[in-house]
Image: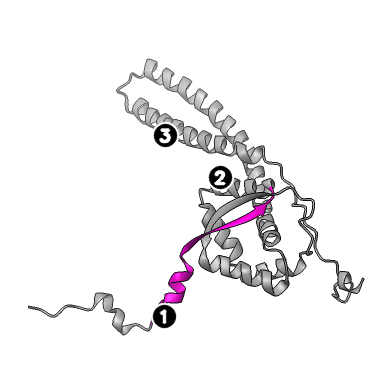
């Protein structure tokens, strides 16, 4: 019996080995936050429109420790006062939750407010996709007009050359491909209606005020 060969020669490579802590950090956990309806909708819209799971977006925003700490340090302790909020449970990674709790504790900032401001980072994406959505609608209308002209031209080919003529056959294939593309683009544009109807606004969260030297004016008041 031949000795078992090394799998891809991995034993000869110097690769970092995952630790149990790393793997546990990727575990999914449920976390409940009180967020504004606008923030919840923004997260849902980006996930649905881009075809990305909410968990992936949430983890991307929260696991960015540097940005998270910058956000946490700028948030006023009473910044959520008067903001309409609802409870929402999300599935996030354990490491993302740990990063959020660390930033909240070190900056003495409300955890919910950090999440609100983190989701604010999605607003430029929604704004850009809204512009693209308008362009896609115009392009789709051009494609429909072009397709109508193509179908009319195909009818002429079938009358003048016959259905079996190579020109008719090839052009018919092109029209079918264009029709398929038009259907897919139309479906994508229909999904984009949620972005068009979304009320793009900045979340009502106050940030700390600083003087020219970077000192916290709230503490000096």
Give the residue at x 38% y 16%: 160
Q: Relative to 133, is 112 above or below?
A: below
Give the residue at x 51% y 23%: 148
Q: Is residue 30 magenta?
A: yes
Give me the disc on residue 49.
Answer: 2
Q: Sequence order check: which comes first, mark 1 or mark 3? A: 1
Q: Does the magenta stretch include residue 88?
A: no
Q: Relative to 126, is 185 above or below?
A: above
**95 or 190: nearer the eye?**
95
**43 or 5: nearer the eye?**
43
Q: How is the image coloured?
A: one colour
* Magenta region: 15-36
Q: Position of residue 198 (x, y in %)?
A: 67, 41
Q: In this view, does 153 lie to the left or right of 135?
A: left
Q: Sequence order check: which comes first, mark 2 or mark 1? A: 1
Give me the disc on residue 177.
Answer: 3
Q: Is mark 3 on a helix, strand or loop?
A: helix
Q: Sequence order check: which comes first, mark 2 or mark 3? A: 2
* Res. 128 in view: no
Q: Is mark 1 on a helix, strand or loop?
A: loop
Q: How crowded is mark 3: few (under 14 residues within 10 Å), some or many (20 or more)?
A: few
Q: Where is residue 130 in the image (x, y as percent from the top left)?
A: 65, 43
Q: How crowded is mark 2: few (under 14 residues within 10 Å), some or many (20 or more)?
A: some
Give the residue at x 61% y 35%: 137
**167 or 92: nearer the eye?**
92
Q: In this view, does 190 lie to the left or right of 211?
A: left
Q: Residue furthest right?
A: 221
Q: How far apart are marks 1 and 3 (CA)?
A: 48 Å
Q: How far apart are marks 2 and 3 (CA)?
A: 24 Å
Q: In which quarter of the image is residue 191?
A: top right
Give the residue at mark 1: 16
Whether tag 1 and tag 3 are in contact, CB under 8 A, the answer is no
């Amino acid at each position: 019996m031949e000795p078992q060969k090394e799998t891809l020669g991995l034993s000869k490579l110097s690769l970092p080995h995952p630790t149990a802590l790393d793997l546990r950090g990727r575990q999914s956990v449920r976390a409940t936050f009180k967020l504004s309806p606008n923030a919840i909708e923004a997260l849902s819209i980006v996930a649905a429109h881009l075809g990305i799971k909410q968990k992936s977006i949430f983890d991307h925003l929260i696991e960015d420790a540097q940005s998270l700490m910058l956000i946490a340090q700028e948030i006023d302790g009473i910044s959520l006062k008067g903001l309409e909020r609802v409870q929402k449970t999300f599935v996030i990674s354990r490491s993302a939750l740990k990063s959020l709790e660390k930033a909240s504790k070190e900056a003495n900032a409300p955890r919910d407010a950090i999440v609100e401001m983190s989701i604010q980072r999605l607003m430029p994406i929604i704004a850009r996709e809204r512009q693209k959505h308008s362009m896609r609608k115009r392009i789709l209308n051009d494609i429909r007009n072009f397709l109508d002209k193509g179908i009319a031209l195909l009818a002429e080919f079938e009358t003048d050359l016959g259905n079996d003529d190579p020109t008719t056959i090839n052009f018919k294939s092109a029209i079918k491909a264009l029709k398929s593309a038009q259907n897919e683009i139309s479906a994508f544009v229909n999904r984009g209606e949620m972005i068009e109807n979304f009320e793009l606004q900045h979340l009502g969260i106050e940030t700390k005020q600083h003087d020219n030297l970077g000192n916290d004016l709230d503490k000096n008041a």
